[in-house]
Image (cartoon, rainbow, N blue to C red):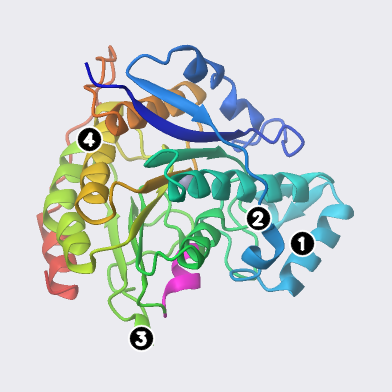
Amino acid sequence: MMTPSKIAISIVPSPEHTLQGHPENVDRFEYFDKLMDEEKAYVIHKVDRPIALDQIIHKVHPSEYVQALTQAVQMGPGFLDYGDTYITQESMNAAFNAVEGTLSVLSAIHEGASEHGFALIRPPGHHATATQAMGFCLLNNIAIAARYAQDLGYSKVLIVDFDVHHGNGTQAIFQEDPKIVYFSTHQAGIFPGTGHVGESGQNEGEGSIINVPLPPMAGDKAIELICDEILIPIADRLMPDILLVSAGFDAHWNDPLANLQFTIGGYHYFASVLKTIAHRHCSGKVLFVLEGGYNPNTLLNGIRATFYALAEELLPEIAGDDARYAEPTIESLIANVKHIHSL
Ligand SMILES: [Zn+2]
């Protein structure tokens, strides 16, 4: 029997940054203890490494922004960004710890302690631009991880974002950078309103942003088509040195914030494809970083499905995890993305 695959993880629940009644609160992590109890198909190993954060954070967020955010937090509690991004007086700690948890796992992967890992952190990051907190996000964890990866010698980085919302912050940060390619599936027309097919990068970064905005009710069939027709060819063309994943689980059919119909089986499939890409191009190196996912039980199952995929294990069946409605066809969307990106 093969040794079970070792998965590096960090868990940063940030109980000091929470707001009752808000979807992005500490209750999302309520069931994560179960992940620690059931190491069968996989072995998770917790990492916690001290990392000098300031310089790395400033490669994405100017120090003026971090200072202004720190001041706003000190005057908290309150809201930034027209009301959906709350802060408490401890939110800066939480944001720094989330970055540290993310970079800890990346560092463990870099050093070979595990070839893959998952940073289970909050607050999430992909809506935060270089100079603006928004969409429950304060610092852009995945963008900071991409810059850190480059510091560690991974020159070409592929970021795949399957959160149901478009990662406008990550796109804005990297849209002129040909070395960091950002690929996103998300529901069209919902928050934050960006992520159109035609947003494909700017100047030297032209072509390095790939957006696949999905119609409501798209689900597992869409995932398969997108992986085969777009994501795998993009990865084969780029040949990234490392794969980073903005892993939100709010595209699941029972998530309260949106209307896509991914299932837990769909997430397992998607993660398996990502692992295959990582093996083909990145010596297996792939880092998942948590973004959204607002049904705590679904979030737990989605993360567990990712662990199974990383361990190359079949997912035990989950009763009742079926999309409720027929999926729309997305052939014309696929054709449009392929045309724009010459695939
Ligand atoms: Zn989301």
Residue 69's tag is 1
Q: CA distance from mark 3 to mark 4?
A: 33 Å
Q: CA distance from mark 1 to mark 3?
A: 30 Å
Q: Quadrant of the N terminus?
A: top left
Residue 138's tag is 2
Residues packed near mark 4 inside 10 Å, few (<14), some (14 to 19) or many (20 plus): many
Which residue sits at x=18%, y=50%?
Answer: 227
Q: CA distance from mark 2 to mark 4?
A: 30 Å
Which of the pair 196/58 is nearer the observer? 58
Precedes in sequence: disc 1 or disc 2: 1
Q: CA distance from mark 1 to mark 2?
A: 8 Å
Q: Secondary structure at mark 3?
A: helix
Residue range corresponding to the magenta coloring: 170-176
Residue 168 x %, y %: 47, 63
Q: Secondary structure at mark 4?
A: helix
Residue 337 x %, y %: 19, 66
- Three-letter amino acid code at disc 4? Tyr
- Is 325 inside the magenta-drawn segment? no
Against 116, residue 206 (above or below) is below
- The rendered magenta stretch, by its main secondary structure, is classed as helix
- Is 174 inside the magenta-drawn segment? yes
Residue denoted by label 4: 269
- Three-letter amino acid code at disc 3? Glu
